[in-house]
Image: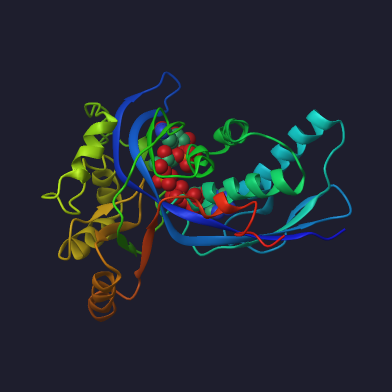
Amino acid sequence: MRSLMSCPAPAKLNLFLHVTGRRPDGYHLLQSVFQLIDRCDTLDFTLRGDERIRRVTDVPGVPEDSDLVVRAARLLQAEVARRTGTPPPGVDIALHKVLPMGGGLGGGSSDAATTLLALNRLWHGGLSKQELMDLGLPLGADIPFFLFGETAFAEGVGEALRPVDGPDCWYVVIEPGVQVPTGDIFTSEHLTRNTAAVIISDFSRHFADQNIGLRQFGKNDLQQVASRLFPPVAQAVEWLGVHGDARMTGSGACVFCAFHGEEQADAVLDAFGATAPSTWKGWKAKALRRHPMEMFQSESCEA
Ligand SMILES: C[C@@](CO)(OP(=O)(O)O)[C@H](O)COP(=O)(O)OP(=O)(O)OC[C@H]1O[C@@H](n2ccc(N)nc2=O)[C@H](O)[C@@H]1O
Ligand SMILES: Nc1ncnc2c1ncn2[C@@H]1O[C@H](COP(=O)(O)OP(=O)(O)O)[C@@H](O)[C@H]1O
């Protein structure tokens, strides 16, 4: 049996990230806007003749069985088997990582979301978008957003999502050569957990105001803690801050800044090549209104 499907897993940026409280189980209540960008991991799926789920590429630091891609595939396989009475065929998954781990770009969650979308189709699973979101949430709080598939205002731990318009722009993103473990940031005694709640129209009004330009909305409450624990994060914010309103995404470590055009982003990357530390990486990406797998059924995956 052979059916090959090649699919993108895009990164996200948190345009702002407020910690507004804490649930009884210790998880933090957030408000954020998630923005998709056109920098992606790629996953190739090949159906097998048996029922095994295998990752066939090496991902340094992530054993096969703990990879979110493998865990997501196994969850869906069990769910489809429960619904149809027959387990769907196994699959070989080749994961080609481009997105850094512990970067705040949601790479692992995006890989898992793409896996759920691709296998739901390959297996004719018939799960709705909401059912896939519910299945993915226990694996990672960012997974529902990638399945939601468009710029979103997020609340709860990131699972309560509403569509919102983000700015149409280019981003320069810096990877400052460190990996930030999300748990270390949320457990810090220095984290503030009481930012006042905003409403979705506060965000929309901010970017509708012509005088604001690309100045960012709100703040990232995790940035101060990450900067303290990982000084290269603060250094990257300072470096990029010379060129615009720079900020960290998610729990870090990556730092980003918005620009109206690709040429401006290119000019910043020229300066980056000349003056930034050699341990950092810098690249540009365009804001995406929608997930590239939205067109999934027709074009963006070659089945
Ligand atoms: C901060 C965000 C913002 O988009 O993204 P990343 O920076 O990871 O991309 C997410 O909320 C990351 O959610 P998620 O991807 O589920 O985080 P995990 O790595 O599973 O969380 C590691 C640990 O952080 C803590 N944690 C996580 C999320 C949250 N809302 N409250 C928490 O307290 C929990 O202790 C959890 O065990
Ligand atoms: N497919 C995967 N890609 C990346 N990381 C993964 C994957 N599966 C599990 N992980 C684990 O999840 C952690 C967080 O990775 P990632 O989602 O890329 O970063 P972040 O949550 O900071 O955006 C990694 O350090 C790794 O241990």
List x then y, in percent, for residue 98: 51, 65
Q: How is the image coloured?
A: rainbow
Q: Which residue of the protein is positioned furthest toward the top in this rendering?
A: 24
Q: Which residue is at the front of the view, 101 or 136? A: 136
Residue shown at 57% from the left, 53% from the top: 295
Residue shown at 22% from the left, 58% from the top: 237
List x then y, in percent, for residue 181: 43, 47
Check the image and report above or below for 293 versus 193: below
Q: Which residue is at the front of the view, 222 or 106? A: 106
Quarter of image, res 129: top right
List x then y, in percent, for residue 154: 38, 34
Check the image and report above or below for 164 versus 281: above
The answer to whether residue 66 is seen in the rendering is: no
Q: Which residue is at the front of the view, 146 or 71? A: 146
Check the image and report above or below for 253 versus 73: below
Q: Which residue is at the front of the view, 64 or 249? A: 249
List x then y, in percent, for residue 46: 76, 59
Q: Say which quadrant the C terminus sits in.
A: bottom right
Quarter of image, res 23: top left
Residue shown at 72% from the left, 42% from the top: 74
The answer to whether residue 50 is seen in the rendering is: yes
Q: Determine whether, in the image, residue 83 is placed left or right of residue 209.
A: right
